[in-house]
Amino acid sequence: MADPAGTVFDVVILGGGSGGYACALRAAQLGLTVALVEKGKLGGTCLHQGCIPTKALLHAAEIADQSRESEQFGVRTSFDGIDMPGVNAYKDAVVAKLYKGLQGLVKSRKITYVEGIGRLAGPTTVEVDGQRLEGRHVVLATGSVPKSLPGLAIDGDLVITSDHALRLESVPNTVVVLGGGVIGCEFASVWKSFGADVTIVEALPHLVPLEDEASSKALERAFRKRKIGFELGARFSGVEKTETGVRVLLENGKKLEADLLLVAVGRGPVSQELGYEQAGVQTDRGFVTVDNLCQTNVPTISAVGDLIPTLQLAHVGFAEGILVAERLAGLNPAPIDYDGVPRVTYSEPEVASVGITEATAKEKYGADSVETVTYDLAGNGKSQILKTAGFVKLVRQKDGPVVGVHMVGSRVGELVAEAQLIYNWEAFPDEVAQLVHAHPTQTEAVGEAHMALAGKPLHAHG
Ligand code: NAI
């Protein structure tokens, strides 16, 4: 490996999470010389504190539910409880294996990996522990961390964030979850399956408020059935420590007692004290601002991932990292259509979507120019076998393509692959209706919804 000091790299990347490492891998593949700087572990939030460990917990939760409910399927099992060290060992092993694989991948692409805390020291320079790395281009990919509210101190013990929630050594008896967004709903789902009493507090009128209202309402119905409590339109006003845990106070006067308070009110960018402002990089509320090709106002500096004000999703980070690598290599990548990015909340049931909501479509095209259809999973054989409820809802511009697909139900996250092709290829309902879907699968529900929208429903009244 070349001595990093004294070498001028094509790209120096600050941050080795989803956005940064994807940029490094693609840039190296395109023949660019790359230095990748990471202060923690390669893989970042997604691999170590986010997507992967939480989905392992959600899978363990699914197994708990299935063993508890197996009699419904004529299978006798006994559910003896959750062995949290065992769950953590399983989760950590999944992470460790992927981490090892990723380290090997970075090594095999001949990327210069520099461990340490990096700082932007100029438009083409990153400084790591006194060592200066020069690049023709610099990519900022320093990600995000959990946010809190003014006056709400995280102590990591009774008042925690998702970082701490991933490391709990026992299942709490009662939890209050502040924030009914993606993180709040996923942890509420896990803890309920693990046997805890859970209450979510959400300031807006619905859970997962960015989703189509029909999806939010269906999730609320399902959570109600699972006896997950929630307070909607409820704002947090304070927290007090008690002998046994916490008392959470709401502006509506309610007081909720619990062992723990999980704060899940969003994630904020990591952009302070990293030399960004001194280098003249423009920011907005801490997010680094970029054009539609992830270029900042400084010509040699790009930025990707949770640090920029786009969807905070690992797969968006990957896409932005790849886009920047291709642009720097002189290719001509197309800007990302962020509406075309699939979104999945991996709770039980899952919520998945791509494209725009019915409300946004009505704003965009006018209320009379929007058509929707909702196909109930009650008509889908495989969903009945799984005993799940939910729907596939389509939003289309009248006489135009499908502009939104919204789904709720067990395992519907996997259906978003087809939905994203439909949205991104601007398919018309009758084109999708022609495609034969395998029976009995949940993908049929996607086919049937399009058949209904094309005016020829099969297993639906229409
Ligand atoms: P979020 O922005 O999705 O949800 C935060 C929620 O907290 C919002 O619904 C907001 O209205 C509510 N809130 C804010 N202030 C409040 C207050 N004072 N009282 C009550 N409620 C309040 O953020 P979240 O869930 O923390 O996730 C952070 C990011 O990580 C998101 O962008 C999310 O998309 C991403 N993520 C994605 C996952 C996935 O794709 N499956 C999984 C986990 C996180």
Image: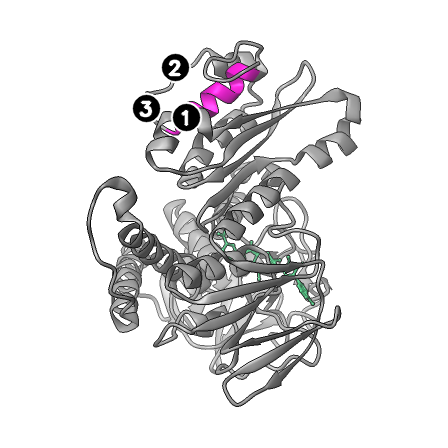
Residue at image position (60%, 45%) is: 216
Circles 2, 1 touching at the beta carbon (< 8 Å)? no
Report the residue marked by disc 2: 436
Q: Quadrant of the N terminus?
A: bottom left
Location of residue 151 with respect to 309 vertically, above or below: below
Report the residue marked by disc 1: 380
Q: Amino acid at mark 2?
A: Val
Q: Quadrant of the C terminus?
A: top right
Question: How many labels were placed on the picture?
Answer: 3
Q: Which residues are magenta?
A: 442-452
Report the residue marked by disc 3: 440
Asked which quadrant contains residue 144, the reply is: bottom right
Q: How far apart are labels 2 and 1 at the CA level?
A: 15 Å
Q: How far apart are labels 2 and 3 at the CA level?
A: 12 Å
Q: Earlier in the sequence, mark 2 or mark 1?
A: 1
Circles 1, 3 touching at the beta carbon (< 8 Å)? yes
Location of residue 204 with respect to 274 vertically, above or below: above
Q: Amino acid at mark 1?
A: Asn
Q: Please say whether residue 216 is one of the residues in the magenta stretch.
A: no
Quick one: SS at disc 1? loop
Quick one: SS at disc 3? loop
Q: Amino acid at mark 3?
A: Pro
Q: Residues within 10 Å of mark 3 (few under 14, many from 20)?
A: few
